[in-house]
Amino acid sequence: MKILLWGCISSPWTMWFIKDFLLKYDYDVYVLETSITDQHRKFFEDNNINIIECPSKVINWYKNGKRGNRFKTLYIYYLQIKAVLNSGNYDIINLHYVDEFNAFLCILLKRIQKSKLILSYWGSDLLRISTSTLKRTGLLTKKSDFITFDNEDLKMKFNGLYSWSYKKKNEVVFLGLPILNIIDKKMKSNNENLFRERWNIPLNKKVIAIGYNAIPEQQHLEVIKCINNLSEKEKENIFLLFQMTYGRDEEYCLQVKKCAEATGCQFLFLENFLTDEEVAEIRIITDIYINAQKTDAFSGSVCENLFSETVLVNAKWLRYKEFDKAKFKFIEFSDWMDLEDKLNKALNENVDLSSNSELIWSMRAWESCAPKWEEVYRGVLNEE
């Protein structure tokens, strides 16, 4: 089967999707060259992924931030469509991360080639886009053959936006988390003390991780204020961990660092991008993970912490639909005052975490996710 994979081609999530699903099921995969780095090109070439070459005008347009007037944009559309048509017909076009621009092109290709079109929504393409933009995009998405969502919250948002959604075949199909395999292997090695030494974290301290990226929506400052209200004795036994890589704003990072210093707690600021091996170690050595961001859609980082038997202290406003379907064990807080009380519980009591690892593995390991993607693909192909 010939598959055209479109959108977020350079994302690690897309790489995992190709490696752990499409290649394992022997699909013939094509990608469009728009913003492929040398590293990604090597991955595609090493794995026999077909790269549809585009004219330099298309490549430069992407490099320059898609700048130009309406006529130039339409011309770029034409060049991309022409490049795809020259590569032959496709059984399935799968658009990952849905936006107006890419949805328009994929609908056009679907009509010309009589292909099946699967739209795959990730997190922020539904949760952090204006309603007016989503309504315009909906005029296109209703022309697809199948829609997948990476979690239940996205599906609920989609169904609430579009009155026609009940007529459209759609399903929650998770993207797998290959890092779970790495965490599992490292946990079985019983080397947590070695990992702590590697990251210069004292063995006798409780490690509290706050958020998983550097954007203000993670609400680091509010969480730090709550930690600062703990007793001095408790703060002496705490080590704070900040993963401040994605979405960095230097001024905001400086604010967070100053507030962390003011608590008197030891802390570690991770400012360089981490390998999967390093992320796995960070998850394992974390005792408590505070998830207080404004919005989220059952992110991979939350899943990784649950899998590594970390105590999740989760904001009530982030009550994921997955929590209603599976009996995850975690601590929930309703507001900032309540967070102080729940932190005391997490620090001083033995919290039952049984079954968290098994539940996450059944949901998010690629060995569990790939067969579900195969069902979607085969189902779409078998439709008349």
Image (cartoon, rainbow, N blue to C red):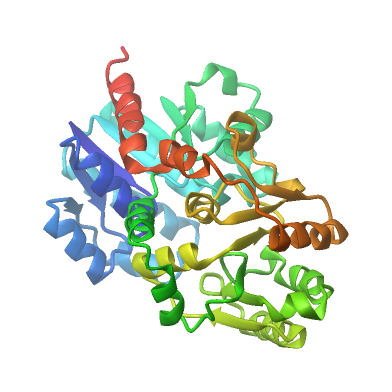
Compare residues 347 and 305 and report the one nearer the observer.
347
Question: Where does residue 55 sit, x and y in percent of width and height?
Answer: 24, 61
Quadrant in the rendering for residue 265: bottom right
Percent x, y of residue 215:
63, 69
Tell me residue 121's x, y (percent): 49, 41
Q: 195 or 172: which is nearer to us?
A: 195
Q: Quadrant of residue 106?
A: top left
Q: Classify residue 16 as left or right of residue 177.
A: left
Q: Quick check: 312 above or below 56?
A: above
Q: Is residue 105 visible?
A: no
Judge from the rendering whether residue 87 lies leftward or rightward of residue 165; answer left or right.
left
* Residue 346 placement, left or right of 226: left
- Farthest-out residue, top: 384
Q: Residue at x 58, y 23 (%)?
A: 165
**Quadrant where the N terminus lies?**
top left
Q: Residue at x 49, y 56 (%)?
A: 70
Residue shown at the point (32%, 61%) measured from the top left? 189
Q: Position of residue 267 (x, y in %)?
A: 61, 82
Residue 85, relative to residue 198: is it above or below? above
Quadrant holding the C terminus: top left
Residue ID at (24%, 37%): 3
